[in-house]
Image (tube, rainbow, N blue to C red):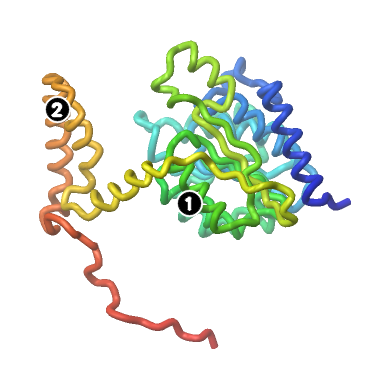
């Protein structure tokens, strides 16, 4: 029997209430399953996966697998639901071990319904139909790169793959890039509404030990949950944003056009050390910046000092042809 949109939203709300109260649906931490997601985040994904377990047209998808905590957790909660995790393991992996760890955990916990897609998330989303076997993504967990463009691409490129009752869970919503991209997505796609969001006072790296313990048991670095609301049963609720944060995005454009744009992170670390008058940190930061500059010079020396558009070789003009 089909479920109305309102009934579905109420089911998701009940899942959120249960998660707020109880956290994880099932706990495998004692068996070695760990990661960097909040326990409530893993818990809500478990319950959402279970909600769609009997739907032959549904599947679970996450962007950003890391070491497999959420992928394994969702797969175990709904053994009959195909679960897919996309990651090329290019970040947060200094030892290059995360793919091996994630794969071993899928085997260790016998998560036979889970599949790793080792690819860049944009390429994977473009070719996702080849993996889904006709199914649609009912639970979509976005936890990949957290820059504005990557977040928005995940939401936009995922649209055509979404189930009619899809639930989108956006992780690390504390970051302004994430909040703004969700806001802009909701503005452009009013058929979706934000049903729930939660934030912490700081990134876990900047919390006290006591604060970190509390938020690791919760939503950690923030969460947003979006649902399709075709009948307009929900009010408009947008992520909290500060207009002054838009300066950050303007600064990105100013940095991108410069000859040494790729050195922006190292340059800011050096600027911080200089402004803090920390001579030791300044020396290390200067050395790191110059070292990276050596690897960048192959391309940067041929650029302009400013206003680089990277448009050399683009077509002067072109028309789209009608499809015959």
Taking depth in this image into account, of 196 and 81 the one nearest to the observer is: 196
Q: Earlier in the sequence, mark 1 or mark 2?
A: 1
Residue 242, image quadrant: top left
Mark 1 lies on a secondary structure that is helix
State whether residue 34 is above or below residue 133.
Answer: above
Viewed as shown, does residue 27 lie left or right of 182? right
Position of 233 with respect to 1 (left or right) is left
The residue tagged with tag 2: helix, strand or loop?
helix
Q: Could you tell me residue 22's position as x and y percent?
A: 70, 21
Tag in front: 1 or 2: 2
Q: Which residue does the image show at 14% across and 25% down from the upper left?
A: 282
Can I make out residue 60 in this image? Answer: no
Nearer to the camera, 60 or 247: 247
Mark 2 closeness class: few <14, some 14–19, many ≥20 residues within 10 Å: some
Q: Residue at x 35, y 81 (%)?
A: 318
Toward the top, the furthest residue is 210
Residue 18 horizontal/vertical position (percent): 73, 27
Give the residue at x 61% y 32%. 72
Residue at the outermost bottom position: 324
Q: Is residue 53 left or right of residue 44?
A: right
Q: Where is residue 196 drawn, in percent x and y?
A: 63, 37
Of residues 1 and 252, the one drawn nearer to the viewer in this rendering? 252
User: Which mark is on residue 152?
Assistant: 1
**Front residue of 51 and 128:** 51
For residue 290, which quarter of the picture?
top left
Q: Name which quarter of the figure residue 302 lies in.
A: bottom left
The CA distance from mark 1 to mark 2 is 35 Å
Residue 274 - label? 2
Looking at this view, name the residue that lies furthest to the right: 1
Residue 48 on image: x %, y %: 70, 38
């Amino acid at each position: 029997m089909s479920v109305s949109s309102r009934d579905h939203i109420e089911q998701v709300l009940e899942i959120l209430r249960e998660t707020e109260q109880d956290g994880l649906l099932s706990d495998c931490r004692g068996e070695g399953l760990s990661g960097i997601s909040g326990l409530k985040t893993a818990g809500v994904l478990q319950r959402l996966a279970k909600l769609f377990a009997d739907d032959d047209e549904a599947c679970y998808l996450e962007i950003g697998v890391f070491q497999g905590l959420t992928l394994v957790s969702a797969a175990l909660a709904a053994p009959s639901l195909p679960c897919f995790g996309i990651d090329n393991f290019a970040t947060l992996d200094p030892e290059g071990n995360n793919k091996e760890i994630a794969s071993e955990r899928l085997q260790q916990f016998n998560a036979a319904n889970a599949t790793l897609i080792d690819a860049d998330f944009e390429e994977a989303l473009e070719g996702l139909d080849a993996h889904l076997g006709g199914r649609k993504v009912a639970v979509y967990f976005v936890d990949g790169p957290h820059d504005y463009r990557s977040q928005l691409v995940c939401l936009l490129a995922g649209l055509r793959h979404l189930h009619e009752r899809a639930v989108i869970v956006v992780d690390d919503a504390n970051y302004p890039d994430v909040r703004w991209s969700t806001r802009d997505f909701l503005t452009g796609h009013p058929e979706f509404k934000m049903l729930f969001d939660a934030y912490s006072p700081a990134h876990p790296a900047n919390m006290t030990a006591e604060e970190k313990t509390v938020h690791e048991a919760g939503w950690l670095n923030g969460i947003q949950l979006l649902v399709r609301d075709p009948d307009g049963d929900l009010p408009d609720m947008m992520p909290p944003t500060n207009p002054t944060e838009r300066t950050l995005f303007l600064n990105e454009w100013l940095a991108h056009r410069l000859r040494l744009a790729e050195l922006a992170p190292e340059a800011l670390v050096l600027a911080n050390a200089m402004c803090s008058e920390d001579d030791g940190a300044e020396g290390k930061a200067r050395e790191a910046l110059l070292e990276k500059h050596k690897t960048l010079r192959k391309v940067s020396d041929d650029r302009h000092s400013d206003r680089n558009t990277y448009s050399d070789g683009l077509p002067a003009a072109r028309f789209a042809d009608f499809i015959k």
